[in-house]
Image (cartoon, grey):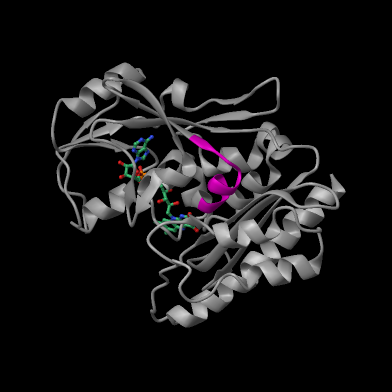
Amino acid sequence: MLLESVEYTRPRNLDEALRALASREGAAVLAGGQSLVNVLKNRVASVDLLVDVSRLDELRRIEVGADGGLEIGACVTYDELERSDDIRGAQPMLASAAGHIEDRQIRNRGTIGGNCCLSDPSNNLPPLLIALGATMNVQGPGGGRQVPAEDFFFGYFMPALEPGEILRSISIPPLADDAGVGYQALSVGHDSKAIVRAAAHVRGGDTIEDARVVLAVVGPRPVRHSAMEDLLNGAPASAETVERASEAIGDGDGLEPISDAHGSADYRRRVARVLARRAVYEAMMRGARS
Ligand SMILES: Cc1cc2nc3c(=O)[nH]c(=O)nc-3n(C[C@H](O)[C@H](O)[C@H](O)COP(=O)(O)OP(=O)(O)OC[C@H]3O[C@@H](n4cnc5c(N)ncnc54)[C@H](O)[C@@H]3O)c2cc1C
């Protein structure tokens, strides 16, 4: 289907973009357009004005702080994430996850901000950003605010953005020397729609510290599994610990997996347990190597 006629503007800076967004109730941010344009073509939603922020320099930068922390502009594309030496050096798992997003065209145009603001629970980046302890830097007509990544993904296609707000950038703290990150997914096809995702961060040598275990596609939003984290923190860094902690993923733990053509809710829950175990184990191994 062809795109219906829609007004389009390309502001020169973020302030102009915010003013354009506020000028019309039916205005929407356009980044890479990989999801939004499809939605409009399929008449699933309509907008009056597209505010194209994809070429704003201030949303396209990747900055590394003195401590190794990153600030990534919302309009940095997946391809740029995958190729950036700064990202590969500071957060290699993020570069790798971006490189596993399906097909070259999407990676050339799709942006880290669009991936987050779409808030599709099956998307690659949200669970990883939560595991990395990221913060979303949001700009609105009244100023800026910061939202922890774990509070940003509110539900199916519902980011925690107020009307008129734009995601400006994403800050990621540096990885500690003894920290590692793991990321696992089961997909319908290679690098395709995920059935379940699990991301993990752990720190520590013989004893596990600062465990973050995030599960996605098991409910409307990616979630940290605090019961599994509690069993990991302070326990010896061993395969037995990880195995035992993963048993916390089960009935009544708040996960809300759906049943569909790709798997029942029960199957997804069992896969979540296996992937969480693998992600934590991978994080431990990577932390031990660094
Ligand atoms: C064929 C196909 C395959 C795909 N495969 C994958 C995959 O394997 N993994 C994966 O994770 N995703 C996948 N996607 C989804 C895609 O990666 C993202 O949805 C898309 O790239 C979002 O980025 P974008 O820059 O194109 O956003 P757009 O489509 O421009 O915008 C998406 C939404 O976010 C809003 N938005 C965008 N940027 C901002 C901002 N800075 N501030 C506020 N709101 C904003 C827009 O208004 C819109 O509502 C796929 C999509 C398609 C069409």
- Highlighted range, magenta: 127-135
70 or 83: nearer the viewer? 70
Residue 47 x %, y %? 17, 42
- 155 left or right, relative to 212: left
Q: Is residue 168 above or below residue 77?
A: above
Question: x%, y% of residue 224?
Answer: 53, 55
For image coordinates 59% across by 48% down, the residue present is 131
Q: Which quadrant of the structure image shows residue 200?
A: bottom right
Front in this rendered view, residue 1 or 263: 263
Residue 203 image position (x, y, % from top left): 75, 46
Against 287, residue 168 (above or below) is above
Quadrant, the N terminus: bottom left
Q: Quadrant of the C terminus?
A: top right
Is residue 50 left or right of 66 when viewed as pictured?
Answer: left
Q: Residue 199, located in which quarter of the rendered image?
A: bottom right
| Residue 263 visible in the snapshot | no
Q: Is residue 67 visible?
A: yes
Left or right of residue 27, residue 123 in this image: right
Residues 134 and 212: in front is 212
Q: Residue 9 falls in which quadrant of the image?
A: top left
71 left or right, relative to 210:
left
User: What's the residue at 22%, 28% (across, down)?
Assistant: 21
Closer to the camera in the image, 106 or 253: 253
Say which residue appears at 21% left-offset and 54% top-offset: 2
Q: Is residue 133 magenta?
A: yes
User: Is 196 inside the magenta-drawn segment?
Assistant: no
Instruction: Name the residue: 50% across, 44% down.
Output: 108
Percent from the top left, x then y, of residue 83?
A: 65, 39
